[in-house]
Amino acid sequence: MANIIRIGACLPRLRLERRAMAQAMGWLVPGAGAGRGTRTLAFWDEDSVTLAVAAAQGALGGGSAESLTFATTTPPFAEPQNAALIRAALRLPALCLTQDATGTPRATLLALQAALEGTAPSLIAAADRPVAQAGSTAESRMGDGGAAVLTGPGAGLFAYLGGASISAPFLHRTRASGAETALDWEERWQREAGYQAQIPPAIAAALDRAGVAAAAVDHLILPCPIPGSAAMVARLSGLTKAALAEDLADRTGDTGAAHPLLMLAAAMPRIAPGQIVVLAQFGQGATALVLRAGAGVADHPGLPALDHGIPESNYLKLLAFQERLDWDRGLRGRFIVQEAQSTAYRNAEALLGFVARREAETGLIRFPPRNDLPGEDWPLADRGGTVATATADRLAYSRHPPNCYGLVDLQGGGRLMMDFTDPGAADLAPGDPVRFVFRVKDIDETSGYRRYFWKAVGDTGRGR
């Protein structure tokens, strides 16, 4: 069996205030903006693929993996395989086994259980950017985010003791193929016939396989957007001394497939080496994994990005960023994204992996690379740089005006014209340090085709 070696996470910087949601939609839908605090809001060029890439970078820590599973309920593409794009962006070997796991937020723990019961180094990257009906309770409870874990042999953050999965044709949330939003069934049905009836048997089976008594469990990590359900599951499961992990409802919302791993990362500062943790999730059945904390948890920072969000009070940004608002884009916004799939494939290493070329004779860094000259690959994604020039263009079309770009001096040599992104893009100035993030470059609103590339964001030294 394998262990959990590292955990990575990515939370968008914007935090949409629920009171703003209530103010915008409460006149029409009384339950709009349900709950307190904020929910995470992905920027216009963030989707589940880019969030997964950012989280996976932290989980890999410069290492590699033999397999990659992308877990999500909101894949940008039904075809092609999204995991193949993520693998290329992470520069994992072409022999890496890639697969998409979708259809339920429990896909993350199903993939994690399979990886932990194997031996090969495996990466599970989970992310969601869910869409719900405007003003609905689901829209308020949801959030955007990504998380990833690297599993493999040897000591790590958590040792895997055993797990169990129960499958059930339980339909509490359905979304037809091709539909944008899902339909939720009555909440009491979800709570009583779903969470309370299906998770305790999975926990009992997992504890039995692990040889651990219920009374010995120190922590329960269970995502559940229905208030009070996690505590009831703990009581029904006999977890008499287990501390319930913070559900992050007031700070991020429920981030779907990413949420069990985000909750686990956030709980790390309260988990001591040697303690027993049950990680569980519901969705057409339930999965429960029993873990023992290793020595590495004592030095883990938790989830620093929780404390570095930017409050957002404009509800319309959620609709605009999710392409649910039809607004006047002006003459400059009327363009078609050229798919050019053959060109994208031939240049995938440069476009997705952000790999330049360092010439052997001159030491010159070239991007796009010239592979016909002797030299070595020069990955740029992890190097960062410094702003040389900065422009905030209010004439050019942008989904979040102004359109920001400039020249960046790359660490190790070279200068490149790049897009700037994230809420503070317009504030970047010459001399500011930047790091590079994998984002959506542009979207064809007719076909849904999207291109990806790397952009520059201010490097504040804060965790994602």
Image (cartoon, rainbow, N blue to C red):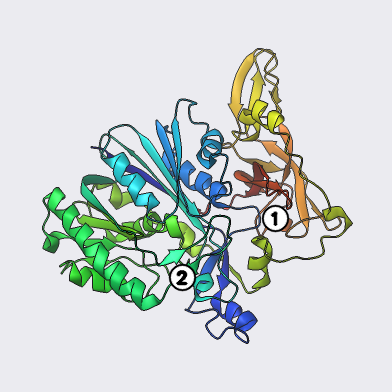
* Residue 259 image label: none
Q: Toward which corner of the image does residue 123 lie, by quadrant?
A: top left
Residue drawn where x is 38% and y is 50% of the image = 108
Q: Toward which corner of the image does residue 18 lie, by quadrant?
A: bottom right
SS assignment at label 1: helix
Q: Which residue is mark 2?
A: 184
Question: Which one is in front in this view, the residue at disc 1 or the one at disc 2?
Answer: 2
> Is residue 276 or residue 129 the one in the foreground?
129
Left or right side of 159 for 53 = right
Specify whether residue 250 is in view.
Answer: yes
Determine crowd level at label 2: few under 14, some 14-19, many 20+ residues with C-alpha closer than 10 A: some
Determine crowd level at label 1: few under 14, some 14-19, many 20+ residues with C-alpha closer than 10 A: many
> Is residue 98 or residue 175 the one in the foreground?
175
Q: x, y (%) of residue 91?
A: 53, 31
Q: Earlier in the sequence, mark 1 or mark 2?
A: 2
Q: x, y (%) of residue 75?
A: 54, 50
3D distance between C-alphas at marks 1 and 2 = 37 Å
Q: x, y (%) of residue 406?
A: 76, 45
Task: Find the residue positioned furthest to the right.
Answer: 331
Specify whether residue 396 is in view.
Answer: no
Left or right side of 67 for 10 = right
Residue drawn where x is 52% and y is 46% of the image = 54
Quarter of the image for the N terminus: give it: top left
Residue drawn where x is 64% and y is 41% of the image = 454
Q: Amino acid at mark 2?
A: Asp
Q: Amino acid at mark 1?
A: Ala
SS assignment at label 2: strand
Q: Which residue is mark 1?
A: 425
> Is residue 184 or residue 303 the one in the foreground?
184
Residue 245 vs 361, above or below: the answer is below
